[in-house]
Amino acid sequence: MSKKKKFYTVWKGHKTGVFDSWNDCKAQITNFEGAQYKSFPTFEAAKKAFKGNYFDYIGKNKSFKSELTDAELKKIGLPNYNSIAVDAASSGNPGIMEYRGVDTKTKKQLFIQGPFKEGTNNIGEFLAIVHGLALLKKNNSNKILYTDSRTAISWVKKKSCNTKLQRNEKNKPLFDLVDRALIWLKNNHYTTTIVKWETKAWGEIPADFGRK
């Protein structure tokens, strides 16, 4: 079964505009710090988005309706909005990767890193959690932290990045960040509670890039 064609809007890149293939989009964002891009199902939607603001489109999802029963939803409850949410996006595995953190309630972006030339979603999720922990500790905040990655939670608790991605010159900047994150975890005590985001009950995590 063939994949549906997508169109890619690039707000910030070597060249900006609407591109009709991932390879064309990738050429514009590779090695461009702070690149802004997103896929759309139609050329018209991508063209309309290009006239607007990048931050009005990332993380925007279709209306979500949970398939869980009322009893299951009641058991899970609602998200704690005294929190931040983190997420990563990777185009390929490995592929171009970035991560960010937002205020769970307002979706105001608190930090963003990337895109990196070669990374994985798991590494991005791991770095996003550590970045969030460091930010909350710096601000002496009692907020909790949401992530939708059980793998990243495990890595953080073990203070180890168990990626199978091999280090090379292409991903050196990313692994430099990983090394810094590991040093931070080993040298800092934090009280922040890390909580798994309940996607089946609440929809995509607020920090989601909305590029699926």
Image (tube, grey):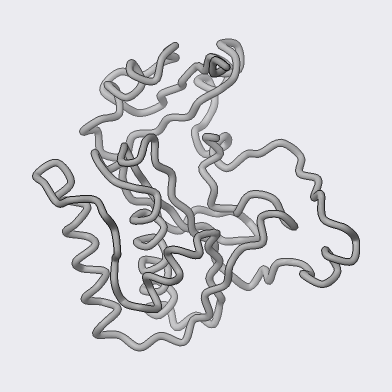
Q: Which quadrant would the N terminus be assigned to in this image?
A: top right
Q: Position of residue 190 (x, y in %)?
A: 40, 85
Residue at 54%, 18% (x, y): give it.
3
Q: Which quadrant would the C terminus be assigned to in this image?
A: top right
Residue at 36%, 54% (x, y): give it.
124
Q: Position of residue 137 (x, y in %)?
A: 40, 80
Along the line of sight, the residue nearer the viewer: 29 or 153: 153
| Residue most extreme to the left | 169
**Number of marks present in the image shown:** 0
Residue at 35%, 40% (x, y): give it.
93
The answer to whether 67 is drawn above or below residue 131 in the figure is above
Judge left or right: residue 71 versus residue 149: right
Which quadrant of the view contains residue 28? top left
Q: Position of residue 48 (x, y in %)?
A: 58, 17
Which quadrant of the view contains residue 19? top left
| Residue most extreme to the right | 70
Residue at 30%, 41% (x, y): give it.
94
| Residue most extreme to the front | 1
Q: Position of residue 211 (x, y in %)?
A: 52, 35
Along the line of sight, the residue nearer the viewer: 178 or 68: 68
Judge left or right: residue 179 versus residue 2: left
The answer to whether 33 is drawn above or below residue 109 in the figure is above
Along the line of sight, the residue nearer the viewer: 57 or 79: 79
Judge left or right: residue 187 versus residue 105: left
